[in-house]
Image: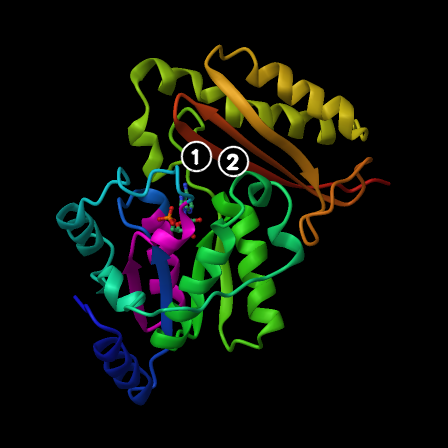
């Protein structure tokens, strides 16, 4: 396990000297099968896999769950042993943000809607830490989950705008048997809450059916259907239902080629997000 950026740089240099490509999987720990699918993808594409585990304070809002966020490090390390024993980088907060740290990476445009409205400082925290991880690890490829769709758009934009020499690989969302997207935050849910959360993924597959099978193209009709489905769960409060272009994240009024539907909702104090990417072929 690597604890410092200096050690990480040495490790990366050794991998590159041995002609190995480095695949980085940035995480906040509390690992589940979604994270492990990224590790497996990295193992397949790269000769050296690096998983970072860092609960990044900069990406939490002041009233969010930074202090409660689960940190089961021993269990995480055990899980990683079942996924090919990648190298693991676990820095202290002071290693990433030493006293006097005063930098922030801001990406415009795609950071603004949806999550940007509800979590206005979130993406600056994400891009700052991810850029630091890219630079310290000299990763050749970096693996992210589609689960955090907007985050992927933001990272891709950062990589493009700042000419960062890393290839971004996006892996599909891993779900529980009932469809709920796996998330470290699912462990906050009570049994009653957990049973209600199934409507989130169900509302997205319902929307997919409307678009693909019923050929409905009007965004408001689809949004209303998603809303009604989610509202069958008494304790879920919707933050947003966005129907947008997958590259620009501009909201659509009618659906033509590609569309992403993003939802965010709260149940009790737990905030959950999900999305579905749909390709439409009209002829
Ligand atoms: P986190 O630890 O929540 O910051 O997530 C670390 C990485 O794992 C991010 O790229 C997430 O998008 C990805 N991830 C989280 N949950 C899932 C999931 N259910 N399926 C696939 N990837 C996921």
- In the picture, the quarter occupied by the N terminus is bottom left
Label 1 CB sits under 8 Å from any ligand 1 atom: yes
Residue 271 sits above or below residue 224 on the image:
below
Which residue is painted at 47% across and 65% down in the image? 104
Label 2, on which residue? 274
Circle 2 packing at 10 Å, graded few (<14), some (14-19), many (20+), is many
- Which is nearer the eye, 152 or 97? 97
Residue 114 horizontal/vertical position (percent): 61, 40
Which residue is painted at 83% across and 40% down in the image? 282
93 left or right, relative to 235: left
Q: Is residue 49 magenta?
A: yes
Label 1, on which residue? 181
The quarter holding residue 144 reads bottom left
Which residue is painted at 38% across and 16% down in the image? 195
The stretch in magenta equals: 35-60
Labels 2 and 1 touching (C-beta < 8 A): yes
């Amino acid at each position: 396990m690597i604890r410092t950026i200096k050690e990480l740089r040495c490790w990366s240099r050794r991998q590159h000297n041995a002609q190995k490509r480095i695949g980085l999987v940035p995480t906040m720990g509390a690992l589940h099968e979604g994270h492990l699918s990224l590790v497996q993808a990295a193992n397949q594409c790269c000769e050296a896999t690096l998983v970072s585990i860092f609960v990044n304070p900069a990406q939490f809002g002041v009233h969010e769950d930074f202090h409660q966020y689960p940190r089961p490090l021993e269990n995480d390390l055990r899980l990683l042993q079942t996924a090919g024993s990648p190298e693991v980088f676990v820095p202290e907060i002071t290693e990433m943000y030493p006293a006097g740290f005063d930098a922030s990476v801001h990406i415009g445009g795609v950071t603004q809607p949806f999550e940007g409205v509800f979590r206005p400082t979130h993406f600056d925290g994400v891009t700052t830490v991810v850029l630091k991880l890219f630079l310290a690890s000299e990763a050749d490829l970096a693996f992210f989950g589609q689960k955090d769709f907007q985050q992927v758009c933001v990272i891709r934009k950062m990589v493009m705008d700042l000419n960062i020499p890393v290839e971004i690989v996006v892996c599909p969302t891993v779900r529980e048997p009932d469809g709920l997207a796996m998330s470290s935050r699912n462990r906050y849910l009570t049994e009653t809450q957990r049973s209600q959360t199934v409507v989130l993924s169900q509302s997205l597959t319902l929307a997919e059916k409307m678009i693909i099978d019923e050929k409905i193209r009007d965004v408001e009709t689809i949004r209303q259907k998603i809303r009604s489905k989610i509202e069958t769960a008494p304790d879920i409060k919707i933050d947003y239902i966005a129907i947008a272009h997958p590259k620009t994240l501009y909201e659509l009024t009618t659906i033509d080629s590609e569309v992403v539907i993003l939802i965010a909702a709260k149940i009790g104090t737990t905030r959950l997000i999900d999305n579905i990417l749909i390709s439409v072929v009209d002829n």
